[in-house]
Image (spheres, rainbow, N blue to C red):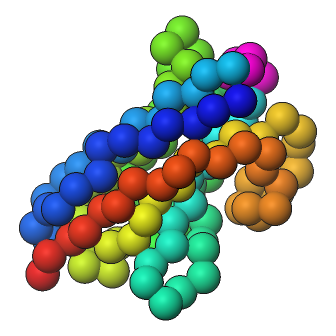
């Protein structure tokens, strides 16, 4: 299973950016998906996750109301729409896929990871 994240870049504070993560080599509809991020000098942290069907979503408090995750099972792709970006959102963003139920917020519960895409928010 391969995950390819894209869409990162440089954006001014208050702006928007959309990330995509294309999944290949597996059965995408059976995976719950998540986005995590890691800022320089900090540990990786949970951002958001979505259930296999796409009906349930979960957000970290820091991004609630500003970020939106969506899953398109027909395109084998998960999206992350980021609005009202802040300097503290600057990080490498990773998408991840999981096959089994468990804690959506725990990176250790995910089976497959993408390579990461850098998001830089200038203040």
Q: Position of residue 46 (x, y in %)?
A: 61, 65
Question: Along the line of sight, which residue is nearer the eye, 41 or 54?
Answer: 41
Q: Give the residue displayed 83% in from the left and 55% down from the top.
A: 109
Q: Could you tell me residue 29's position as x and y percent? A: 70, 18
- Outermost residue on the bottom side: it is 41
Dominant secondary structure (helix, strand or loop) of the stretch shown in magenta: helix
Quarter of the image containing the C terminus?
A: bottom left
The residues colored magenta run 26-30
Q: In the image, what residue occupies the spot 63% across and 32% down? A: 2
Q: Is residue 27 magenta?
A: yes
Q: Quadrant of residue 89?
A: bottom left
The percent coordinates of residue 73 (x first, y second) are 58, 16
Residue 28 magenta: yes
What residue do we see at 74% from left, 17% from top? 27
Instruction: Tell me where residue 9 appears, x and y as whole percent.
Output: 22, 56
In the image, taking residue 23 as reference, residue 80 lies left or right, namely left
Q: How many circles with numbers are drawn on the protein?
A: 0
User: Does residue 51 appear in this view?
Assistant: no
In depth, the one of 1 and 16 nearer the eye is: 1
Is residue 8 visible in the rendered image? The answer is: yes
Query: What is the quadrant of the N terminus in the image?
Result: top right
User: Where 23 falls versus 101 (above or below)?
Assistant: above
């Amino acid at each position: 299973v391969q995950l390819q994240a894209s869409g990162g870049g440089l954006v001014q504070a208050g702006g928007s950016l959309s990330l995509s993560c294309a999944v290949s080599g597996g059965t995408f509809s059976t995976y719950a998906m998540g986005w995590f991020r890691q800022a320089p000098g900090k540990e990786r942290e949970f951002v958001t996750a979505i259930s296999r069907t796409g009906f349930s979503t979960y957000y970290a408090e820091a991004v609630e109301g500003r970020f939106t995750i969506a899953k398109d099972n027909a395109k084998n792709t998960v999206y992350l729409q980021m609005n009202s970006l802040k300097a503290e959102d600057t990080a490498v963003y990773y998408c991840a896929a999981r096959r089994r139920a468990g804690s959506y917020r725990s990176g250790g519960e995910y089976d497959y990871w993408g390579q990461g895409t850098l998001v830089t928010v200038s203040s």
